[in-house]
Amino acid sequence: MLHVNSISKTYHSKAALSDISLTVQPGESIGVIGESGSGKSTLGKIILGLEKPEQGDVHFRGSNLHTLKGQALKASRRHLQIVFQDPAGSLNPKLLVWKSVVEPLENFPDVIPSFLKEVRHDRKKMAEVLFQKVGLSSELLERYPHQLSGGQKQRIAVARGISLEPDLLVCDEPTSSLDVSVQAQVLNLLKKLQRDLNLSLLFISHDIAAVQFMCERIVVLKEGLAVDSFLTEDLFSESRHPYTRLLVEMSMEQEYK
Amino acid sequence: MNIQMPRINRIPFFFKNQNLLIQWGIIFFLIITLITLIGPFIVPNDPLTANMSERLAPPSSTYPLGTDHMGRCIFSRLIVGAQSTLGITALVVATVAIIGIPIGLVIGYIGGRLDTVFMRVADGILALPEFILAIAIAGFLGPSLTNLMISIVFVKWIAYTRVVRSIVITERNKDYVQAAKVGGSSSWKIIRRHMFPQIVSPVLVLATLDIGKVILTISSLSYLGLGAQPPAPEWGAMLNDGRPYFQSAPELMIYPGLAIFFVVLAFNLMGEGLRDKWDVKSR
Ligand SMILES: Nc1ncnc2c1ncn2[C@@H]1O[C@H](COP(=O)(O)OP(=O)(O)O)[C@@H](O)[C@H]1O
Ligand SMILES: [Mg+2]
């Protein structure tokens, strides 16, 4: 469904991504791990069509994403959504949260997600259903982002991400700005939604435990290079790249601290 | 950004409380608005009727503030003059905002070459101080109120475009805009729904503070003879009229001067108060 073919991206003559390839099948969840600055977000933005790669291409549902324009690009985007790292930044501070949630549905009046069939004519009702789906009370519909906790905001961002019932949801460190206690809740929510909606996930994180919990396959990025790629069950195998093993060790140490 | 906004640097101690600042500003503002709207109906005398036998009369029950060099009621002229001074100002500021805001939104959001071209033009226009430029244009077009307004609008819209542009440039890269794009929103929709709300409070602050500035500009240009033409009762023109009599009858200049002072003060207080309340940074 998604094929990333040896893409490279340079910022200010510094390589952010070099020769990255990966494939995501329907319903599959792929983890991308790496330290801060390793190019994870850049990869996500390219896959979403927000940035253009200098080399290589991204094929999504059979078309080259970066040659699409106007209506064709918009049509592809309907299947391709995002949850950003910082929920405070990903919601317009001056907009009631329910309006942020239904914005994609306004843009695609012909799209009727399975879970919104009965209420598709009513924006407010759609927001209510979506809030339910992410475990939020409908009392929170009429709030502004600053009146909500980080976890609640992130659930709202997730609600917006699934509102069009996309094929692929890119989650760029969706839990790393949240309290530890809330992180697990949001991960559980994402996992449940992924199963219920048969979503593909591109799950970006520097938290190995989270990726291990969420994903079937893992790609390791280091300074823009994909140094390792494997099935999650092989995370502790002898054949792992030394850098992967280093990351694993570091995350273990953190846990025992 | 190098847009200058007038700032009261030392706020008197009793205005230190920001809400008090707004309250006083609003009280003044309401009084001024009331006078402007109903003033012309309640003035004791016709502001244009000259009565040469009663030139420079002292205050009396017929003429609360006395008469000017042509025997016209100063009080009536001040009250009616509020309408022309403030009416023109409101019209100028509104026009400037209506021109400046959309251009700033589009240029800021689209960026690129459009933005470069705009900045060149803006720098070119503003190479001269605003006031000097307004004088030059008003002088070139010829003395009349309409030309005065055109010249001020021509100079002033740039400040609005710049403020709006710089806000949009910082906002457009935030995640919520990226999320809106991914959600299929058009540039037009993003500008309307996401960018516009971000600029409302800063622009209101800018406009409120500008009202004082524009009043001063209109009055100054009228004082120089480039704006309202006699016998129209405009405060700056009244100052100009009173100039030859400054030694013998200083009240001819003092009254319109005080009127200008209080109105400018009121709008500046309100602007400063709103700026603090909404936490708008000077740009
Ligand atoms: N818009 C940008 N302009 C310039 N450099 C950027 C930009 N976005 C990312 N970079 C650079 O690219 C590299 C990868 O960044 P990023 O993809 O954000 O990494 P990660 O998400 O893994 O922390 C970093 O060195 C970063 O400084
Ligand atoms: Mg990142």
Image: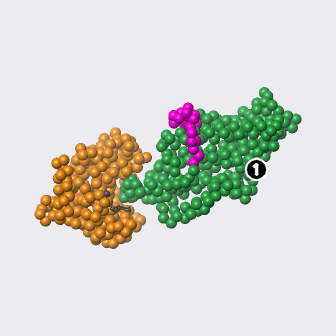
* Residue located beneath label 1 in the image: B225
Residue at image point 60% right, 62% down:
B124
Q: Where does residue B173 sit, x and y in percent of width and height?
A: 41, 57
Residue A7 vertical placement versus B191 (above, below): below
Check the residue under mark 1 and report the chain it is in: B
Find the magenta span and give its range.
Answer: B5-26
Q: Residues within 10 Å of mark 1 (few under 14, many from 20)?
A: some
- Left or right of A162 on screen, residue B261: right
- Left or right of B50 on screen, residue B104: left
Q: Quick one: which chain is green?
A: B
Q: How is the image coloured?
A: by chain
State the residue in front, B88 or B226: B226
- Left or right of B146 on screen, residue A102: left
Query: Most extreme residue toward the right, as rendered?
Result: B53
Q: Where does residue B212 sit, x and y in percent of width and height?
A: 62, 44
Residue at image point 40% right, 54% down:
B174
Apparent colour of chain A:
orange
State the residue in front, B256 or B46: B256
